[in-house]
Image (cartoon, rainbow, N blue to C red):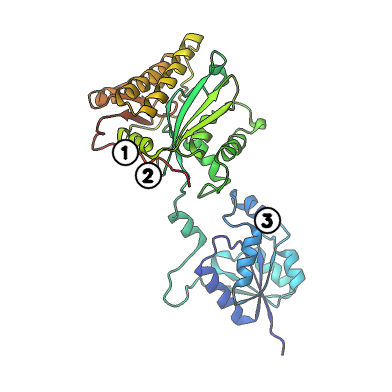
Amino acid sequence: MAEKKVFVSGCYDMLHSGHVAFFKEAARYGDLYVGIGSDATIFQLKARRTICAEAERLYMVKAIRYVKDAFINTGSGMMDFIETVDRVKPDIFVVNEDGSTETKRQFCAERGIEYVVLQREPDAGLEVRSTTSIRTTVKPQLPYRLDLAGTWIDQPYVSKYGAGWAITISLEPTIEFMERGGMSTSTRNAMKKIWPYNLPAYDPEKLAKLVFCFENEPEKGGHISGAQDAIGICVPGLCRHYYNNHYWPEKIETIHDEAILRWLEQHLCLIPTFPRPEGTSVVEGCKIDEAGVKALAAAADQCWEAILKRDLQAFAAAYQASFEAQVAMFPAMVSEEVQRWIDRYRDQALAWKLSGAGAGGYLALVCEVPPVEAIRIKIRRRE
């Protein structure tokens, strides 16, 4: 007597022991056939990219010994498996209890297919696993960005008054930095839609260009996020990028010298203040002119040279000058509450600035020895 055909369907991204236990139990009813959601369907349903592309997921599912055969479903939506079912013609349709719906039950009844609901049970000695539980415990390892000097020059409405460099460093995610804290979390959140956990092994500058284009969709209009955010995240080490009245820099230079990176880690630190308040506009009351932009650009040049020489006093002076040039053009960066935070650490630091656009976030200090409560940074190295 021929074995009955059994059908199951799902995404099977981040394949884990719970999936295998489910396949093992379903295969007790007969020869097991698996329908797998396509990349397009998963993006449509969950608004995220898959960790493993459909070809890889198909390969892995087919390799499991309980599976007779597997297919990529050609439909869309929650019922993307209809054409696969009509192709396989199963006798039994098996679902987990949390995947059971009345629509699926009615679909099987119309085709004379037995509908079986299983409890989610781990195999002997194993923990209960689900993709959702793994996603909530696995933290993204995407980097953050800290801007050091010259930033705001990446906006054409600034660099049209004079070209110059922005200096950034890419940071390892040693902590989860606050949202609206000037650490480029909005750009990082946009990146998660493409790469939820890690940057792919690809040319860093090209990755940054992809992120910049993805985040700034032309149809959306409105504010254009500066390229220094994407570059600062994607390009490892110490980086400077040259802007001349365009959104994308004319050139990018990087430093990966270990002595320089360790020196920066020893003397740069972060003090968390508070998230930039919703509705805050740091461009209100701005005063951008040729003199202000030249001061910003000159400070960035001096900052870069001081870092290369590991001259702490010169670095602190240029770092402070860059921040003062920013605030002269964008006074809304420093509110009364922000000023109180600056005053609190004035005597413990050689220089200070606010991360990102300011009005909150992190106070980034240059210190001989960082305060004990400060967050120490870890600069991301090349692979």
How many residues crowd mark 2 within 10 Å: few (<14), some (14–19), many (20+)? few
Where disc 3 sits, the SS reads loop
Where disc 1 sits, the SS reads strand
Dot placed on the residue nearer the N-terminal end, 3 or 2: 3
Dot placed on the residue nearer the N-terminal end, 1 or 3: 3
Amino acid type of the residue that numbered disc 2 sits on in the rendered structure: Ile
Residue 71 vs 217, above or below: the answer is: below
User: In this rendering, does residue 37 appear at all?
Assistant: no
Residue 289 vs 66, above or below: the answer is: above
Label annotation for residue 175: 2
Image position of 212 (left or right of 257): right
Whether the residues at callouts 3 and 2 have beta carbons within 8 Å, the answer is no
Q: Quadrant of the N terminus?
A: bottom right
Where disc 2 sits, the SS reads loop
Q: Nearer the viewer, mark 3 or mark 2?
A: 2
Label annotation for residue 246: none
Q: Nearer the viewer, mark 1 or mark 3?
A: 1
How many residues crowd mark 3 within 10 Å: few (<14), some (14–19), many (20+)? few
Residue 192 vs 303, above or below: the answer is: below
Image position of 19 (left or right of 357): right
Whether the residues at callouts 1 and 2 have beta carbons within 8 Å, the answer is yes
| Residue 103 location (% of width, % of height) | 66, 63
- Read off the residue under disc 3: 77
| Residue 255 location (% of width, % of height) | 45, 34
Label annotation for residue 375: 1
At horizontal 73% and vertical 75% (from top left) the residue drawn is: 112
The foreground one among 68 and 74 is 68
